[in-house]
Amino acid sequence: MRCGLRLLPLLLCADVACAIPSDYIYTEAPRYDAVAVANGGERFPSGAVLHIVSGTRDSVLLPGFAASADACISFDGRRVLFSGKENPAEKWQIWEAPLTGGAPRRVSTTPEDCVTPFYLPGDRIVFACRMREGFQLRTAPLAGRPASPLTYVPGNQIVSDVLRDGRVLFEGSHPAGIRDLYTVYTDGSGVETHRCDHRHDRHMGRELSSGDIVFETGGKLARFTSARAVEIPLPQTAGEFSGPVAEEDGGALMVSYRPSRAAPYSLYRWVPGRDEPRTPLVANAWQPVVVRPRARPKIHPSALGTREGANVLCLSVYTSKLRIPEGSIAQVRVWMRDTSGAGIALGTAPVAEDGSFFVTVPGERPVRFELLSKDGRTIASEKGWSWLRSGEQRICVGCHSGPERAPENALPQILVHSTTPVKMSLTERQ
Amino acid sequence: MTRRRFLLGAFAIGSLLLQAGPPAERYPSPVELAVSKDGLCLFAVCEGTDEVVALDLASGTIVRRIRVGHVPKSVSLSPDGKRLYSANSWSDTVSEIDTASLEVVRTLPAGFEPTSAITDRAGSFVYVANRISNDVSILDLASGVEIKRLLAGRGASYLERSPDGNRIYCTHIYPNPGYFRAPPQSEITVIDTARQIVAERIALHSAAGVFHIAFSPDGGLGMAAEMRPKNLVPLAHVERGGVIGNAIAIFGPDAGEVVHVPIDELDRYFTPPFGIAIPTDGKWAYVSTTGSDSITVIDMERLSAYLRGLSPSERRALATDLSASANYVSSRITVGSGPRGLALSPDGRKLYVANRTGDTISVVDTAAGKVTGTLRVSGPAVQTPQRRGERLFYTARFAFQGHMGCANCHIDGTLDGISWDFEPDGFGKDIVATRPLEEIGQTAPYKWNGQNPDLETECGPRTEKFFWRSESYTPSELADLVSFIKAIPLRPNRYRQPNGRLTVAQERGKAIFERGQRMDGAAIAKGNRCLACHSGPYHTNQALAEVGTGKTTDRSPWFDTPQLTNLSLTGPYLHDGSAQSLEEIWTVFNPNDTHGVTNDLTKDEMNDLIEYLKTL
């Protein structure tokens, strides 16, 4: 099938949304292992090939490539960014090809695998690259160099989408032992979980035209809406979904789905809530993307200052889903993860009566916070590592307060005591 | 008024005026609406063209343009439907219009900057909210005389009558003077219409910028559109409601303690909430959000049920819960540009929305929940750079996730009456008060530290990076925005006498302002005289000065000398808003006579100085 053409049924289902199918690209693969990346493994252990479908004509998009996947269409709809291997023994690299004809161009030139590329505004891209710490996100000019790190914690992160508000949505490990969706600005600042209802593995979220983010979780599809702090299941089906979805004009979703475990994953068009996915378009297919122009996300104007380290102002440790008793916290301890994986205590800082604290932490290093009582007992502790960029100034509404919690309009007492943050850094001995 | 009568009475004259179009090619800028009692006619007050425009709702055509006073801000119907009242904010008058003849039959005097005028239930008195004099005038309609003036809060602006007519409620666009670095406090002033006294002041904690009020049909629930700034928290990012919360304050016997109900979401904001309308069946509340070009539709049954299910502590925490609106907001309806005032048809089937910067009125089918028509109030066909800039000024679409626009803090081009802590200088440092924007085009440099040489710098990269936190204006958009800001006019100064002369007290104050000697005859150093810095047409030498007002949290004690035009309106004072009144500038913050020599003044002399300053 790799070099040939095949004709697909032109679906004219009852749904208006399905009446005029769009051109689309998908990844054909014998196997797709969505969770493999959590361990730094290969998502396409048996190879993968990008196809483009135009009308009823299905053709291999990049005949000269041994493997290709992860298609992302440019904002003008004329180019495609993808992960590819010219030869089977090569590592995955990022490539770009014109959709109107012309030779593909290699964008990344690293010795390790680079996958899940996405266009950013301003002729830049974001992708995941295998590093010593696992897959890490990188941004780079579309011209290729120099690449800049976007993530700074161990584990495997892969890009999931670029949201229209300019943030990068990515999939990463959560200390609860699951995969979850995170957002980060394109300068690496402001990282946080998109929602704090950590329940099941969440994979490959995609933003729809409504602003909802649809993702796969446990073989089902669910979504995050702007209005809710928790995931909302999409109408249930008998079978299983896999990988990211694509939205067509009119709101129909293109999904990779299998009606039963015995069936192969195939691409379907599906309008959630109307019916089960019915007629497969093409078998052994994942990662559909619609070929069309789309709105360019906004550019994030980085406000990173030139100061050393990052300032963190927590407004109240008591604003928390953890039910931390009022008045129980006297200090905050900051931990940093060293290159061997060990945690190093950088020091402690006072927590004011209202629960506020103000510290400077090292930038671009994994850090976590621990709340201590007056006698030094640990009352609450972050389980996972996060990071801040040097020059970043971050305000936390609370400690695990959830993104739905806006700040109270109150003057943090810690700023009344001092506007100078307590510096948390390695001592000479450390 | 029957439709036939309305048409006969108005069409003949109206058709002539229609050909003439609005005066002088100004943009009408409809801000408020009223529907005739029979539902056949819509009245739109257009602040840009000083008119009330009457539209026939059957045909959608303009039947009459009624010239009223300058910059009218409101239109309301008398209980019998025979009269319309328009508050003319720059004329300090109220126009009384006969709805049959569509003529102004009387012009009544009001306080400083009347912004809203409504009658009592009997139609015997008109209550007028005066934005600048911070009070409510009561005008006797029999005599046409102001019989009483009640002290309201700062920036008294919008009035609403309770369904039983026993109370009139007044909201305020500015918070009351309070304590430095404390949450802003606004109020709803409640007037007993029988005794014509202030019966109650409902405190709105942490609100700044409160607009319209509406009531449930039985009056048990009142709803006030409010902004809830986070000005005490350093402005380091916008997400998670970091700068402003948009909410409805719920009050009244069915609410108990005031509850602040957010209308925002986690990733989208609807700002600023301005108009509210509740149909007679009480099932829905419609809220216009000016910067978001939308109407938020609240399901009142769901809201009531949701509130009933919350504990008192949960109710108090509700204002900061961005996921709460999912429990009672049923939809958002996109309308025209800059929606402000709302009016419902008598049967509640149509909602009319005044799109101020679009010069249109959206017609919403309330059952379908969508716009089914658009009425034009006419206006220039071409959008000038200045008008385009005005739209940019009011829109929230440039801020991250549509969080806010220029007008959220510079309300109607003025200020918000509070102080902010911006990020670049460090948290808790360089606290700054919002400055008004009227007639600032020639007062460079900008910012309190004078670091921005022009408005292009002030509104361009700095705003993008530290306020909007998102990709912002193109160069041409920035030029449009600046052209609008430079053209924001200075409102009339109410403290000058019509004859242009100063009062005796003002004359004495002027002498103090311009003096070169202390009261004991000793010379005042030239650099420490008022005129040394506060000179020129805007009473600023446009330079930095160190006058001893810096705080330990300020990185530099040098500040841009502010212009003094319309000074009485621009509090709180000093760079950080620490002086709650003009007097405090010198009685509290000038202990060593470094901000001019004032410690030799008696109380009366200080009063004279202030009386003069208010005329600038």
Image (spheres, grey):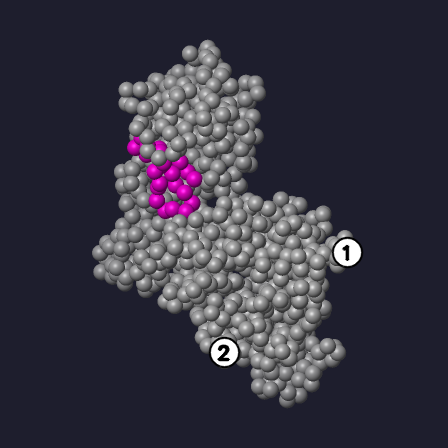
Q: Which residues are magenta?
A: A212-234
Question: Looking at the rendering, in which quadrant would you find the N terminus of chain B?
Answer: bottom right
Residue highlighted by disc 2: B194
Seen at 53% across and 33% down, the residue is: A294
**Left or right: where B225 falls relative to A349:** right
Residue kind at label 1, given as amino acid type: Leu
Residue kind at label 2, given as amino acid type: Ala
Residue in front for this viewpoint, B160 or B350 = B350
| SS of the residue under disc 2 | loop
Seen at 57% across and 53% down, the residue is: B353
| SS of the residue under disc 1 | helix
Q: Quadrant of residue B140?
A: bottom right
Judging from the image, mark 1 belongs to the subunit labelled B
* Relative image position of residue B217 (x, y in whole percent): 45, 62
Residue in front for this viewpoint, B515 or A265 = A265
Residue in front for this viewpoint, A281 or B254 = B254
* Relative image position of residue B488 (x, y in whole percent): 67, 60
**Left or right: where A87 falls relative to B549:** left
Residue highlighted by disc 1: B16
